[in-house]
Image (spheres, rainbow, N blue to C red):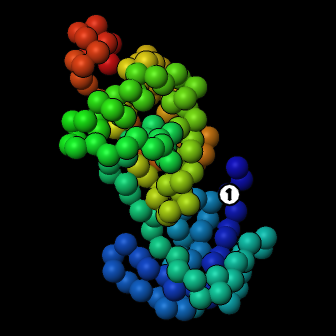
Amino acid sequence: MAKSDIIIHNACILTGDGRVHPKGFLHLKGSKIYAIGKSAPSKKPKGAVVIDAGGRYVMPGFINPHMHLYSSLARGISVGRMKNFGKILEGLWWKLDRALTLEDVYVSAAVGGLASIKSGVTTLIDHHASYGAISGSLGAISEALSDVGIRASTCFELSDRCGDGARDEA
């Protein structure tokens, strides 16, 4: 991707260090912030893309430090009332993670990544379990999140609930 200048103006700019520019601008060169301030420069770089934010907010992306991307496959599942957390793990989550294939892992990561982006999350940490598809699962997640354009750190949840062999593979 070629470096290009993007100028976003007429925006309420919230910075990560507490500064607020109610009618500010943001100048990007490629993927880097080049300038930020109260009023856009009068001289625009040749070929710059200029975006009028219409008073909308521009702010740093959110970080989700605890995500289970495979849970995006459980949305809308009716499991009935479960009396405690252990029953929820046994009745839903452990059944789901044993049934996952690498394709399921990829799709759940893509769906969860897109939902995260839609909510303003730009970085997440995924705590993953797929005892039906252990080897290659973190790679599938990484590929999906790279494809949708979100930063992430992944880890595999260790458990002996599926036996010592699965625990050691995880």
**Camera-side residue: 113 or 49?**
113
x%, y% of residue 15? 41, 76
Q: Is residue 156 above or below residue 166?
A: below
Q: What number of labels is visible?
A: 1
Which residue lies at the image location 48% right of the left edge and 43% below the top edge? Answer: 77
Residue 44 seen by the camera: yes
Q: Is residue 82 above or below residue 131?
A: below
Q: Which residue is mark 1?
A: 3
Which corner quadrant of the image does residue 127 belong to? Answer: top left
**Residue 148 falls left or right of residue 136:** right
Which residue lies at the image location 49% right of the left edge and 63% below the top edge? Answer: 120
Q: Is residue 4 above or below residue 81?
A: below
Residue 69 seen by the camera: no
Which residue lies at the image location 61% right of the left edge and 40% below the top edge? Answer: 147
x%, y% of residue 73? 51, 39
Task: Characterize the local packing of mark 1: few (<14), some (14-19) or many (20 or more) Cα atoms within 10 angstroms.
Answer: few
The residue lying furthest to the right in this view is: 47
**Residue 142 falls left or right of residue 5:** left
Q: Is residue 38 above or below residue 17?
A: below
The residue lying furthest to the front in this view is: 80
Mark 1: which secondary structure? loop
**Residue 33 falls left or right of residue 54:** left
Image quadrant in which the C terminus is located? top left
x%, y% of residue 26? 56, 77
Which residue lies at the image location 72% right of the left edge and 77% below the top edge? Answer: 50
Circle 1: residue type: Lys
The residue lying furthest to the top in this view is: 165
**Camera-side residue: 137 or 84?**
84
x%, y% of residue 49? 74, 72
**Camera-side residue: 96 or 121?**
96
